Amino acid sequence: MRKLFTSESVTEGHPDKLCDFISDSVLDSFLEKDANARVACETVAGKGQILLTGEISSTAEVDLEKVVRNAIQEIGYHDENLDIDYETCKVLINISKQSPDIALGVDKSYEDKEGEKVESEGAGDQGMMFGFATDETEDFMPMPIYLAHKLSKRLTDVRKQGILDYIRPDGKVQVTVEYDEDKPVRIDTIVVSTQHTQDIDLEILKKDIQEKVIQAVVPQELLDEATKYYINPTGRFVIGGPLGDSGLTGRKIIVDTYGGYSRHGGGAFSGKDPTKVDRSACYMARWLAKNIVANGYAKKCEIQLSYAIGVAKPVSIFVDTFGTGIIPEEEIVQKIEKKFDLTPRGIIQQLDLRKPIYRKTTNYGHFGKKDLPWEQIINM
């Protein structure tokens, strides 16, 4: 049976991703000075204005306005008439300390170890988190989001490297892959929308995007005469970033994960320190799922972990190999429980999550990047 599946990616200049990057830059700035900092911050971007809000508890002192402006500059925004200017935009800071009611359950929780109550670190919130892996790409990611991220990253590369000097930071990509019996066989549709300077001819832009972006990263064997291309299908895209649309941290959770190919628990990642299981347990679930596939136990695997606020151990562990497993799913659960500590403290220690590594996760997906700890392959 043949079917189509579509995933989306966005560039780092997309207004929501701008906000994610600012929030993760703030997180890393605190972790550089205080590995135990508690950070849960969000960013809102609008016309000529950035609002940083949330809760931070730390011994470190950080110049938050400087962090915000540096992040905007790094992305490449410097024109208030087209998007936003890192020098002239208004930056509002509204940060308070973490609620003591939340801190109480996170700072001190108890777990059972061999019949004995042992002090641990509780989950920062309730919720369910999913991890996924498939063998259909080298990065163990679904093909649609794998290709969408490559295209959106290439859009940024051609801009920053000066290959296409008329490209501006804001952009979106969409890839539709055709599957035959759950195997990706061809690309049906590619959509690319990129912000640009007002003086570029759209026909030149379309030709350049086809040659310098699409053909540069998409495997030719997946393209055929029936593949459809939509490049800036609405025409001009001059006004972008926060001037074209507001931005908010945590609004691109499907882009951040598996492009909709796997389920999502609903929690966002950026701006949250690793005591927040919204982030750390998703990373752990991905690590488990990837290693189940990489070790040959299944061709495809989805894992759900669920937590209760202030409780150390997960409430439940669910494994689904979609009929591709070579051993029963309950046996995989047993392997996980025996080998891995799934408490927040255990996850942080196993994946070494108190380091300032989060800026590198913000854009082009939190999964599939080989240098991240939850992407490392181990023996199970």
Image (tube, helix red, strand yellow):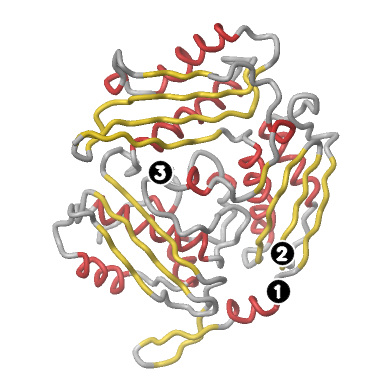
Number of marks drawn: 3
Seen as rendered, the residue at the extreme left is 326
For residue 69, what is the image quadrant? top right
Task: Tell me if residue 250 comes above or below residue 217 in the rendering.
Answer: below
Label 3 sits on a secondary structure element that is loop
Task: Tell me if residue 339 comes above or below residue 272 in the rendering.
Answer: below
Tell which of 155 and 205 is nearer to you.
205
**Label 1 with label 2: CB-CB less than 8 Å:** yes
List the residue tagged with mark 2: 55
Task: Tell me if residue 63 comes above or below residue 167 in the rendering.
Answer: below
Mark 2 or mark 3, which has the lower sequence index?
A: 2
Q: Residue at x 65, y 23 (%)?
A: 168
Determine the CA span between mark 3 and mark 1. 34 Å
Please state, as top left, top right, bottom left or bottom right, where the C terminus lies in the image. bottom left
Please state which amino acid type lies under the numbered disc 1: Ser
Determine the CA span between mark 2 and mark 3. 30 Å
Q: Which mark is residue 368?
A: 3
Please state, as top left, top right, bottom left or bottom right, where the N terminus lies in the image. top left
Mark 1 or mark 2, which has the lower sequence index?
A: 2
Please state which amino acid type lies under the numbered disc 2: Glu
List the residue tagged with mark 1: 99
Determine the CA span between mark 1 and mark 2. 8 Å
Q: Residue at x 25, y 52 (%)?
A: 293
Using a 10 Å C-alpha cutoff, classify the residue at mark 3 as few (fewer than 14 neighbours), some (14 to 19) or many (20 or more).
many
Using a 10 Å C-alpha cutoff, classify the residue at mark 1 as few (fewer than 14 neighbours), some (14 to 19) or many (20 or more).
few
Label 1 sits on a secondary structure element that is loop
**Label 2 with label 3: CB-CB less than 8 Å:** no
